Amino acid sequence: MIPRRLVVIGLIFAVLAAVPLYGADYYTGLATKIMIFGLAALGLDALVGIGGMISFGHAAFFGIGAYVAGLFGKSGIDEGLIVWPTAIAVAALFGAVIGSLSLRTRGAAFIMITLAFAQMLFFIAASLPALGTSDGIGLPHRNSLAGHSLGRAVDFHYVVLLLLAGALALTDFLARTPFGRAVDGIRQNEPRMGALGYNPTIYQLACFIFGAAVTGLAGALVANLSLFAAPDNLHWMTSGTLLVIVILGGVGSLFGSVLGAAVLIVLEEVLAEVTDHWMMILGPVLIAVVLFGGNGLAGFLLRRPHGRTS
Amino acid sequence: MAALLEVRGLCKTFGALAVNQSVDLTVEANQIHALIGPNGAGKTTFLAQLAGDIRPDAGTILFDGTDITGLPAHRRAHLGIARSYQVARLFPDSTVHDNVALAVQACSRWARSVGRAAAGIGELNEPVAALLERVELAHRSRIPAGILAHGERRKLELAMALASRPRLLLLDEPLAGMGVEESQATVALLDRLRRDAAILLVEHDVQAVFALADRMSVLVFGKVLASGDPPTVRRNPEVQRAYLATSGEVPPC
């Protein structure tokens, strides 16, 4: 029998793949946005859910990815095969620096120091003329892929779909390797893992860099979607949004990030038409999911008739 | 011959409470050194300082001639110090097998384990099975560690401590919560372990201590009251007053 988790993941991707077949470009764009935020939150879930590191500054890497795409766009380079790997590499590099400094702390101090780094980057981006100050950097057009234009919303949608599926499969795979199990063990009981001979900081740093790289790719893609790299991508509210998506989807479930992004973005679209104060409705929904969903939407979907999730 | 472990003047205070006051202790290679003392004497705190979980306020710890006082826990583990905990600290949701696998894997280089495929975990099966066989837990390997009986958890702790092929084992009450038969089997196992490693044994079971120990030290209120071979320590009048008598055990003479 196919595990329930794989069935759920299969259904999610089937729905995402079907959207352009039945919907107008508007809906395709919405689904693409869901996948990009799902990808960004996936990088954060690797940190929070597997590594146990609650970062409140993960938008830093989202913004870095976006600005890499923006700067390439400004200088006339629009090949995705150049732009995207560069975005991943630069985000990973920043992840290595920010991670190695932040991981000198744990708990609340870790949350605050990651937030501080992200806000620092936000103010740099918002004030440096080379980065367009508060206007950000516009992209003249979308990146191409191996010379093929991704100007049509449908083409871009499927490329994002493949990248998301690949990132999810890779994260899932890494979580099952000895490396992933060690990171998971450190989250559960750090002193115990130290006594066994694991250097907790090295493992957590590797996990931090991985999460930064995944979110960096999402950043490059979001700049492609909106044709714009904005300081907002780096702002702490974006960090908060990513955390909300992870919690809504189910911490540590990985695929739940896509569900969380779907619910958040669809609710935002629908409710924003009804009222400007849509957050007043979103708040109670979020509380309900956290209180009654077990572990977010993923926990709800994977719940067995009697009790525990798998 | 230099001692495997040499502790000099180890001090640790928590607030106003002096938990260890200038503790000196040596453990020779391939010997079982028992550390006894009443509850609250500072035995567990002492072990935690040797393992690297707690930093001492003063004093030095030499392992095989190297000063390890400032080393983090994981470096000490790589040098050959392993530890079992008084309260079993397992990964309750993982199976018994996976708990031991995590311990075995700790000895391999981390960089190599990153690239190893999920299938590669299978490579650990053989050493894991051997360790579980050794502590007589092989029949429980597929169940979650969280539902093990108390005595079985201690055995699992022991298997995880042995995974790194340590030269020094720090065992905090390995017999606590075991039935008579389990306890005898574990005493026999510890006796055999002497060939591979030195053991610093904190244990309340006086019979087991006298059966196993090559040397023993008595810790009372954070100070070493007496140290030496078991018959000598047993005859020490101060020890009899401070510890052996109060615990209700009259030492067999």
Image (cartoon, rainbow, N blue to C red):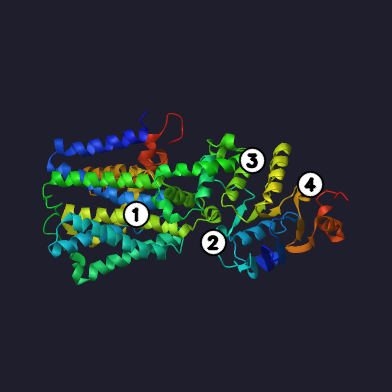
Counting residues from the N terminus, which is met first, the one under dot 3 or under dot 2?
2
Spatial separation of the CA atoms under disc 2 and disc 1: 27 Å
Please tell me if label 3 and label 1 are on a single chain: no
Looking at the rendered structure, the kind of residue marked 4 is Gln
Spatial separation of the CA atoms under disc 2 and disc 4: 35 Å
Does B234 sit left or right of B160 as displayed?
A: right
Of badges 4 and 1, nearer the viewer stands 4
Residue at mark 2: B75
Q: SS at mark 1?
A: helix
Does B196 sit left or right of A211 as displayed?
A: right
Disc number at residue B207?
Answer: 4
Residue at mark 3: B150
Does A117 sit left or right of B212 as displayed?
A: left
**What is the quadrant of residue B46 in the picture?**
bottom right
Tally of numbered tags = 4
Spatial separation of the CA atoms under disc 3 and disc 4: 20 Å
Counting residues from the N terminus, which is met first, the one under dot 3 or under dot 4?
3
Residue A272 lies, in percent from the top left, at 22, 46
The structure residue drawn at horizontal position 36% and vertical position 32%, both measured from the top left corner, is A4
Residue at mark 1: A211
